[in-house]
Amino acid sequence: MKTLFEEIKASIKNNYNQDRSFWRPVLPWGGVFTIKAGRKAVSCTPLYVEIRLKNTCTIDGFLMLLYVILNENENFPRELSLHFGREFVDCFLYLMDTYSFTTVKLLWIWDKMEKQQYKSEVHKASLIIDLFGNEHDNFTKNLENLMSTIQESYCSNWRCPTRVQEDQQRTININPPQEIPHGNLIRLAVDELFCSKIELCEEHGCGGLREFSQRIFCHGAPPFVVLNMQHWKSEDLAYVPYYLDLSDHKYLLEGATLFNKEEHHYSAAFQIDGHWMHYDGLRNVNLILLNKPPEFLLLSSLVYIRATEK
């Protein structure tokens, strides 16, 4: 039996121009999970016999990207098991490969999300879980310590009240430059966050120079990183780098999540063997092979995977 990933790769290989869509829906928006209630369920309060998911696009695109990433490199499942747990990774892959898409969403909700991150209510005989919101709150912030980084800094003034500082971050938020310089803006912004530098100390009345060390990953270079791009304007995204150097490691562009403000809806794009695909769980035909790389003008995030060391 072929895995879902193998099925997608086969559809790319056997693609015909007149039909560039995958043969069946993948991770469709929402979902209904029917509970096979036994006699004990009668005494449960409140009583519900199904779970309905709403507004799942805030996790759908990332779940699709996570599945592709886990299949891109034979070592990635083992590495990600250190952060997510072996049982979670194995169960996630099994559910995706058996097309149990509602169950895989519930796996993420109940295993990785906090209760306060989503709304839930019982309506008649259904438990309704609503994931309306921001995908970075519902997914990126729940990646344990996968992307945790730390940067140390030292002030040249011995009298500086905070001479030694540490800046630790759990996610990678890169901000667009306040002044628009020439060159690759995204790469410049990443360098600003990760590279060593010397700046004037901002402590009141200090006047010293603060030297920042290179920012490093707390738990080693992760298999993938997510760059939060939600504060960038489309005019600043004319060029998206296909590789980045992060803490002495090269990362290659794997995909992106896109945000349509008018519909308040997220979708995703990713590449397999150099072929770009667009995923949108809200559409009937939701996985499409693209003729060319997508335009990254509605970016919510960029996803890069660590390059294989030769």
Image (spheres, rainbow, N blue to C red):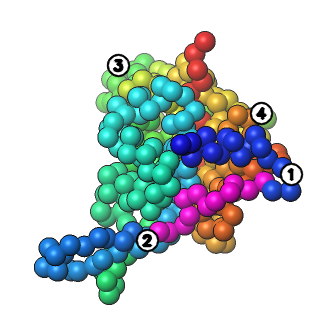
> Cα distance, mark 1 to mark 2?
34 Å
Q: List the residue tagged with mark 1.
A: 17
> Cα distance, mark 4 to mark 3?
37 Å
Q: Are marks 1 and 2 in contact (CB under 8 Å)?
A: no
Q: Are marks 3 and 2 in contact (CB under 8 Å)?
A: no
Secondary structure beneath dot 4 equals loop
Q: List the residue tagged with mark 3.
A: 158
Q: Are marks 1 and 4 in contact (CB under 8 Å)?
A: no
Tell me which secondary structure the magenta stretch mostly adopts: loop
Secondary structure beneath dot 3 equals loop
User: Looking at the image, is mark 4 or mark 3 nearer the viewer?
Assistant: 4
> Where does residue 28 sit, x and y in percent of width and height?
56, 64
Secondary structure beneath dot 2 equals strand
> Cα distance, mark 2 to mark 4?
48 Å
Q: List the residue tagged with mark 2.
A: 32
Q: Is residue 22 left or right of residue 119?
A: right
Instruction: Tell me which residue sits at (67%, 49%) in the image.
Output: 269
Quick one: label 1 or label 2, which is nearer the N terminus? 1
User: Looking at the image, is mark 2 or mark 4 nearer the viewer?
Assistant: 2
Q: List the residue tagged with mark 4.
A: 183
**Which class describes the residues within 10 Å of circle 1: few (<14), some (14-19), or many (20+)?**
few
Q: Which residues are magenta?
A: 20-31
Instruction: Tell me which residue sits at (32%, 40%) in the image.
Output: 87
Q: Is residue 3 left or right of residue 166?
A: right
Toward the viewer: 109 or 188? 109
Quick one: label 1 or label 4, which is nearer the N terminus? 1
Q: Quadrant of residue 276?
A: top right
Instruction: Tell me which residue sits at (14%, 73%) in the image.
Output: 40
> Where does residue 144 sit, x and y in percent of width and height?
36, 41
